[in-house]
Amino acid sequence: MAALLRVVLRRCCRLPATGLGPLPAPASAPAARLLTGSASTPGSASASALAGPQDQALGFGDGEQPEVNLYDKYPEYHGFSSDPVSDLWNMRMAFFFGISLAIVMGSAFVHYLPDRGMRQWARREAERRLKHLETQGLPPIAENYYDTEKIVLPPSGSE
């Protein structure tokens, strides 16, 4: 869906494939000129002053200038390779594996790790034992929870 939207926007808005902004006007089309219905006055601009740099490149101006593609002159460099095609693919793969796999799969892995500290197991075990004691009619905690024979008490007169 996103790729289809990108293609439509590129065709409608004349965006380049790299997403750097609108493309320059094609060299075969002359630049737009301001046309008025009135005759030229001393304060108005002449047609040669309104001609853009593309008109000069097409032979309308003084000298011929070779067309320079700025995307070839200054290619996008992502730092993965000196070859532009492999640099682009390496960048895409690095971001795919870095974002998709590390963050998404990593968070799913951490979510499904076993219970840390066995807190959930201890609660389930306590509830199971309480239910078992209630079905037998016994209190949740017995009177002699600790064996009184093993408890060492201080002498009664040493306070």
Image (cartoon, rainbow, N blue to C red):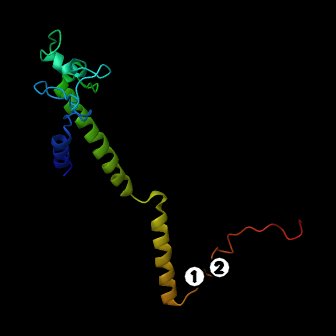
Task: Please determine whether, in this image, residue 151 is positioned above or below residue 144.
Answer: above
Of residues 26 and 1, the one nearer the viewer is 26
Residue 68 visible in the current orientation: no
Residue under circle 1?
Answer: 140
**Residue 65: percent from left, percent from top:** 16, 12
Task: Please determine whether, in this image, residue 123 is positioned above or below residue 27.
Answer: below
Of residues 13 and 141, the one nearer the viewer is 13
Report the residue that reaches farthest toward the top.
63
Task: Please determine whether, in this image, residue 65 is positioned above or below residue 6.
Answer: above
What residue do we see at 57% from left, 82% from top?
140
What residue do we see at 20% from left, 34% from top?
16
What residue do we see at 19% from left, 29% from top?
32
Name the kind of residue labelled 1 in the image.
Pro
Q: Which mark is residue 144?
A: 2
Crowd band around label 1 with a 10 angstrom C-alpha radius: few (<14), some (14–19), many (20+): few
Quarter of the view holding residue 10: top left
Residue 71 visible in the current orientation: yes
* Position of residue 52 in the picture relative to residue 126 (left or right): left
Name the kind of residue labelled 2 in the image.
Asn
Crowd band around label 2 with a 10 angstrom C-alpha radius: few (<14), some (14–19), many (20+): few
Q: Secondary structure at mark 2?
A: loop
Quarter of the view holding residue 7: top left
**Residue 90: percent from left, percent from top:** 22, 31
Q: How many marks?
A: 2
Report the residue that reaches farthest toward the left.
28
